[in-house]
Amino acid sequence: MKTDLTFKERQLESAQTTKTRLSMELSKRQAELEKVNTLDAKISVELNSLSSKMATMETDMDGFQNIEALKETHATTKQALLKFKQQYIRRRDAMKSQVNLLAAQYENLKHQLANNDTAKTLDSLEQKLRHHEQNIYHLKEYIDTKTREVEYDSVKQDCLKCLTELNTIRIKAQGVVEAKGY
């Protein structure tokens, strides 16, 4: 009977291990099946993409079949671009000449201004004015600093407050001494 029991226990353990192994195998196969299903979806998306690319390439190839039309399009585009290039070169040259002319006028006016007595007087007056403004600024700073140094109102208020407190304490102390009769 004991041997029968141990035999049955071994068979039970073997069956349980087999069941566990088979359930693991089942989950593994289900995961593989899911991967295959998603792979099918990816393949169909890729096929659709490739077929649309092929269609666009075929239409492009139809356009390349007519070589004469391509050459004609190239020639007209080239002519238009060369025309634009020439226009822009003319504009650039015109702008350069205008800039050179304006630079010469500017230098001439600058030279005239440097030689003008009124401009020289005006420059010297501007320098004097800047110097006076700087002096005024420094004097204001000095006055503000000295004003802050001699400002005694806050110190006066603190002293009066201390004096009032001391008087109050002294009056209270005097009242205590008189009450005791000393």
Image (spheres, rainbow, N blue to C red):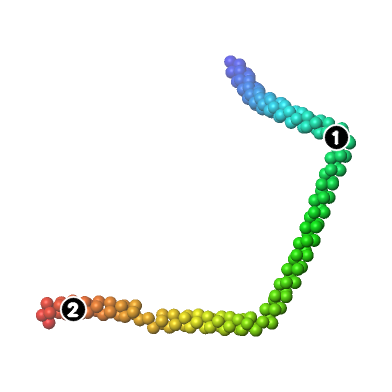
- Residue at the image position 34 percent from the left and 77 percent from the top: 154
The answer to whether residue 55 is left or right of residue 155 is right
Give the amino acid at mark 1: Phe
Quadrant (top left/top right/bottom left/bottom right) for the N terminus = top right
Q: For numbered disc 2, what is the local secondary structure?
A: helix
Residue 26 spot, x, y in % from top left: 66, 23
Mark 2–mark 1 CB contact (< 8 Å):
no
Circle 2 or circle 1, nearest the eye: 1
**Dividing the picture into quarters, in which one does residue 129 lie?**
bottom right
The answer to whether residue 123 is left or right of residue 159 is right
Q: Is residue 88 visible?
A: yes
Q: Is residue 8 above or below residue 100?
A: above
**Dividing the picture into quarters, in which one does residue 145 lie?**
bottom left
- Which disc number belongs to residue 64? 1
Q: Nearer the viewer, residue 168 or 174?
A: 168
Q: For numbered disc 1, what is the local secondary structure?
A: helix
- Residue at the image position 61 percent from the left and 18 percent from the top: 8
User: Where is mark 2, residue-wise?
Assistant: 171
